[in-house]
Amino acid sequence: MTFNEKYIALKTIVIREVLRFTRIWIQTVLPPVITTALYFIIFGNLIGSQIGDMGGFRYMDYIVPGLIMMAVITNSYANVVSSFYGSKFQHNIEEMLVSPTPNYLIVSGFVMGGLARGITVGIAVTLISLFFSDLQIHNLWVAGSVVVLTSILFALAGLINGVYAKSFDDISIIPTFVLTPLTYLGGIFYSIDMLPAFWQNASLVNPILYMVNAFRFGILGVSDISLWSSYAIILGFIAALFIFSLYLLNKGHGIRT
Amino acid sequence: MTMTTALSLRQLKKTYANGFTALRGIDLDVQKGDFFALLGPNGAGKSTAIGIITSLVNKSSGSVTVFGHDLDTDLTAAKSCLGLVPQEFNFNVFEPVVEIVVNQAGYYGIPRDEAFKRAEEFLKQLGLWEKRREMARNLSGGMKRRLMIARALVHRPPLLILDEPTAGVDIEIRRSMWEFLRRINAAGTTIILTTHYLEEAENLCRNIAIIDAGQIIENTSMKQLLNKLQLETFVLDLRAPVASCPDIPGYTLRCLDETTLEADISRDCSINQLFSVLTAQGVEVLSMRNKTNRLEQLFMHMVDANGHRATVPA
């Protein structure tokens, strides 16, 4: 395939993925927006007013970056895992496998679909947050790059889950038992400075902590973690997950006999 | 293999992880422009072979070459030459018909404007243009089959592989699909067909391979294969009832009812002679038909002789 043909193949997968989640926006975009709005109302407005300031900011303002990041993470992941497993389940993944589209473009196409949904939901949640907080962006480039890279990372993770999944149960196990606990413990609702020393150190093995804090730095200008450590962790995970995804597709794991 | 070879399989073997050997080293050549039948009973290895050719199944050993492009060393070029209509529906049933075809073109690097033009061309030819905005799940079984053919053709592959393309399709649509396939074959597309409808293979294909238990047991032209049939059974409809079954030396006749005879006619006897004797005896034949499809008779015989009872739906 020429460069232009590869570009067309990639664009086709991305368009297909974007149409997939926008066609069912009531299932894909609306629920996280409603859920996050409830977080703002309950944790920010009702409970947050009792908590006071955190990290020098109103509690509501403090949790906004974390809640945006949580929506981006869960939606990027959910989009790719459900789309890839759905394609496997209906066997329409074979449409791509019989074509000359290289595997790295298949991985990239699905990931860009996940990125599109993550960013769409992230923007929607950000707009909702404007009703509850006076959102100021400290560093647009940091905020933007962290959210994009994090979305890519979890889209890749979703793809790997989709490759291994053998039933619809398998696509909800990781989000329920791994992703959600790590997200909640990743400093969305609190600063790890509040934790005892042991739990502060334990929190450092949670990669989501780095992403939430890097994004919080981009929005508020405060972070529990060094920005460069966060970038290194995110980029390291992206490289590892991309190589592993490609290996699985090249090997045909779960998709070729 | 020559420049005119569309597909070449050499010592193709496949043993699945559970130890089942589906292919035991098959050799096969399909010439460019051919309409080729790959037949065999269920579980014979047809779909495994097709899966390997289309890169959906990993081979254990052997080689596959598509228009001179080796699957191991020139996979992209080989894939570009292939179009596949699989046995099972394998499109996203929640996508509109036209999107399924356009997206498939995109995976082959065809620009979207051109893809829409081609989608229109093939969907119109296959009678699906009116349904282009319908979700694929709302199509009938026959329409879904035709959608898979349109999808397989959108990148204009020189080799089209059809794995039971008319399964579950009513006779009217099946015959219209035959006409369509004849047209694209006449236009230069090489076609490999697997089917359980042996009448379909006999009508459409010029060459044939029969695969059984992972081995090719016959590979010849349809004409030569049918010439091997030593005995044909015909059903004769009579104008008037006969009191008893006529006794004609050299022919085996059976009365199915008062106005229907069944006649076994070997290749060294002529049908003309049978009619002459029947006319002389005052028996008038209104019409005549083969009791079973000729290829079906041969197929059953060959597969039985290979030690496996064939399972061929009527």
Image (tube, helix red, strand yellow):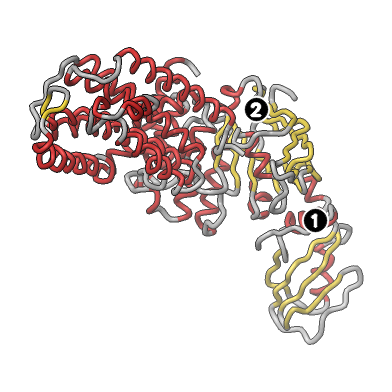
The amino acid type found where label 2 is placed reads Val
- The residue that appears at 30% across and 22% down in the rendered structure is A148
Chain to which the residue tagged by mark 1 belongs: B
The amino acid type found where label 1 is placed reads His
**Placement of B220 over or under B237, stated as above or below:** above
| Front one among A165 and A210 | A210
Co-location on one chain, circles 1 and 2: yes
* Label 1 CA crowd tier, 10 Å (few <14, some 14–19, many 20+): some
Q: Secondary structure at mark 2?
A: strand
* Direction from residue A30 to residue B140 in the image, left or right: right
**Placement of B16 over or under A67, stated as above or below:** below
Image quadrant of residue B126?
top left
Can you tell which mark lies on residue B308?
Answer: 1
Mark 1 or mark 2: whose residue is earlier in sequence: 2
* Direction from residue A216 to residue A15 in the image, left or right: right
Q: Position of residue A252 (x, y in %)?
A: 57, 33
**Placement of B116 over or under A214, stated as above or below:** below
Q: Residue furthest right?
A: B249
Q: Position of residue A63 (x, y in %)?
A: 19, 31
* Residue A152 in sight from this viewpoint: no
Measure the alpha-carbon separation of dots 1 and 2. 31 Å
| Front one among B83 and A249 | A249
- The residue that appears at 26% across and 20% down in the rendered structure is A224
Q: Where does label 2 land, which residue?
A: B66
Q: Secondary structure at mark 1?
A: loop
Can you tell which mark lies on residue A56?
Answer: none
Q: Position of residue B219 (x, y in %)?
A: 78, 41
